Image: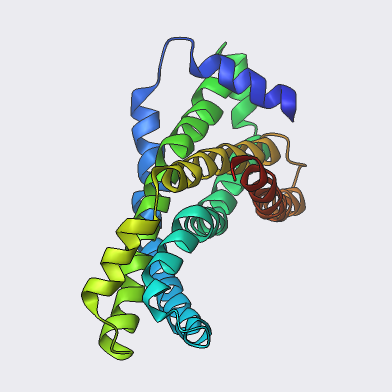
Amino acid sequence: MFTFLMNAFYFIFSPPFKFNLLLKQIRFFGNKSMIIILLTGSFTGMVLALQLFYTLRKFGSEALLGPAIALSLIRELGPVLSALMVTGRAGSALTAEIGIMRISEQIDALTAMALNPMRYLIIPNIAAAIMVFPLLAAIFDVIGIYGGYAIAVKLLGMSEGTYFSQMEVFVEMKDIRQGLYKSISFGVIVSWVCCYKGFYTGYGAEGVSKATTEAVVMSSVLILIWDYFLGSVLL
């Protein structure tokens, strides 16, 4: 798998570049995942506001609700949950698509025509995921913060100025950079694992089913493991 990833990175930076395939996969990862990102982001922010408010009220720190929601989303929940959602929606479909191309011998046909399957099937997906995952995580963060605002200000009666002004004080650029680095690395992990599992899937419907399941499970587990290690390094 590591050799597969290194070959992919080599071809990313070597011409010719397939920009039309890249744009297609950007739409596949990004535009088609937007609804699920908006839904999960808004309700994640609402749940955080509801739970953190009652926790902070016990310590007399309700004014810190805004920063608590923003830091939780920007540093952890935004990159992780958006990556998990895209894995379930786009990663599984990507593995199944490449797997079906393998069992129907379309990949072998590309090789027989002296065309590199990596350049046509793998590189656009990895490059698109690296570009799209940070953008989806940023959208998730913004929607989550406003979801928390809806609960904190409109439902729980918190001051609008307190919610946003304290956020500006406590959220630093290093917190935003940490979320950015995580989302980029999650994009690499998801596209790498899903493309590999699809590219080397077993034959038959059972092989595609097994590869898809393995890709989603492995991507989700690696996201959580890498999130811990990256978080401990960037603290």
Residue name at image x 27 percent, y 73 percent: 162
Residue 79 vs residue 102, the one in the foreground: 79
Counting the numbered discs, the total is 0
In the image, residue 78 above or below residue 134: below
**Where is residue 174 shown, x and y percent of the image?**
45, 42
108 sits left or right of 18 in the view = right
Residue name at image x 76 percent, y 48 percent: 207
**Where is residue 143 shown, x and y percent of the image?**
33, 64
Tell me the quarter of the image containing the N terminus. Answer: top right
Residue 192 vs residue 25, the one in the foreground: 192
**Where is residue 179 shown, x and y percent of the image?**
48, 47
Residue 116 in view: no
In the image, residue 165 above or below residue 21: below
* Colour style of the rendered protein structure: rainbow
164 sits left or right of 74 in the view = left
Residue 224 vs residue 233, the one in the foreground: 233
**Where is residue 76 shown, x and y percent of the image?**
54, 56
30 sits left or right of 124 in the view = left
Residue name at image x 33 percent, y 57 percent: 169
Residue name at image x 59 percent, y 53 percent: 92
